Image: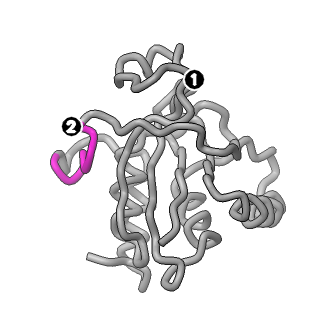
C-alpha cells in the first residue's frame, strides 16, 4: 500500500471524490505541514498555522498508480490559482501534493511537467514533503456523506467520476 497527501481547497469535496476512486483504500482529512502542533479548524482558518487542508490517500498501487491519483486531483482543482479553489480562499485552501517517499517526487515532477503543457497560466500547486499531518476534528471526516447538501466546489468532478469505470460504490 502507498500513500500521498493532497491539497485542493476544502477537504470535504476531495475526500468525497477520492473515496469513490477504484484502488483508493482509505481517506482521512486533516491539516498538513502546520507550524502549530495539532491545530484546530479555527486555528487553521486564521492563517497563522501555515497548515493546508489536506487529504490523506492510501491506495493500492497494483490497482491505481500515483500518476492516476494526480490525474484525479487535477480533475478537482484549478492548479493555476494561489490559495483559492472555488469559493474557498485562504492559505489553507492552496493546492498541493505532499509526499513521504522520496521516489514519489520524480513521478510528481514528471506529471507536472506534462500538465504544464496544458495550461496557459503557471501551475502554482506546491510540491513538498509532508512534515506532519494532524487529523481534522471528527465532524470533518466523511463530512459530505453525513451532510449530503453540504457545500462542495468540485461537485462536477464527482458527478463526472460516476460516469467512468474508475468509480466504485
The residue that appears at 34% across and 69% down in the rendered structure is 20
Q: Quadrant of residue 136?
A: top left
Q: Can residue 146 be seen here? A: yes
Q: Can residue 118 be seen here? A: no
Which residue is under mark 2?
Answer: 139
Instruction: Give the residues in magenta.
Output: 138-146
The answer to whether the residue labelled 2 contacts the one labelled 1, judged by CB atoms less than 8 Å apart, is no
Q: Main secondary structure of the magenta part?
A: helix
The correct choice, above or below, for 98 with respect to 160 in the image is above
Label 1: which secondary element: loop
Relative to 102, 25 lies left or right: left
Percent coordinates x, y for residue 90 in the rendering: 54, 24
Percent coordinates x, y for residue 143 in the rendering: 24, 45
Q: Is residue 38 magenta?
A: no
Nearest to the observer: residue 42 or residue 36: 36
Percent coordinates x, y for residue 34 in the rendering: 53, 27
The residue that appears at 21% across and 37% down in the rendered structure is 139
Label 2: which secondary element: helix
Q: Residues within 10 Å of mark 1 (few under 14, many from 20)?
A: some
Q: Earlier in the sequence, mark 2 or mark 1?
A: 1
The correct choice, above or below, for 89 with respect to 167 in the image is above
Relative to 80, 163 lies left or right: left
Which residue is under mark 1?
Answer: 50
Q: Quadrant of residue 101?
A: bottom right
The residue that appears at 35% across and 50% down in the rendered structure is 28
Percent coordinates x, y for residue 73 in the rendering: 55, 58
Relative to 48, 108 lies left or right: right
Q: Residues within 10 Å of mark 2 (few under 14, many from 20)?
A: few
Question: In the orientation shown, which residue stands out farthest toward the left?
Answer: 146
Relative to 103, 117 lies left or right: right
Amino acid at each position: 500500500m502507498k500513500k500521498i497527501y493532497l491539497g485542493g481547497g476544502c477537504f470535504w469535496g476531495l475526500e468525497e471524490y477520492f473515496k469513490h476512486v477504484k484502488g483508493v483504500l482509505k481517506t482521512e482529512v486533516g491539516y498538513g505541514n502546520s507550524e502549530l502542533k495539532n491545530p484546530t479548524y479555527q486555528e487553521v482558518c486564521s492563517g497563522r498555522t501555515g497548515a493546508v487542508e489536506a487529504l490523506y490517500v492510501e491506495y493500492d498501487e497494483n490497482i491505481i498508480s500515483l500518476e492516476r491519483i494526480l490525474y484525479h486531483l487535477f480533475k478537482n482543482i484549478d492548479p493555476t490559482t494561489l490559495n483559492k479553489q472555488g469559493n474557498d480562499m485562504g492559505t489553507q485552501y492552496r493546492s498541493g501534493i505532499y509526499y513521504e517517499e522520496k521516489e514519489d517526487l520524480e513521478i510528481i515532477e514528471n506529471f507536472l511537467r506534462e500538465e504544464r503543457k496544458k495550461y496557459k497560466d503557471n501551475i502554482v500547486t506546491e510540491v513538498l514533503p509532508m512534515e506532519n499531518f494532524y487529523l481534522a476534528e471528527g465532524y470533518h471526516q466523511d463530512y459530505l456523506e453525513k451532510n449530503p447538501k453540504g457545500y462542495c466546489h468540485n461537485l462536477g468532478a464527482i458527478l463526472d467520476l460516476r460516469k467512468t469505470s474508475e468509480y466504485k460504490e
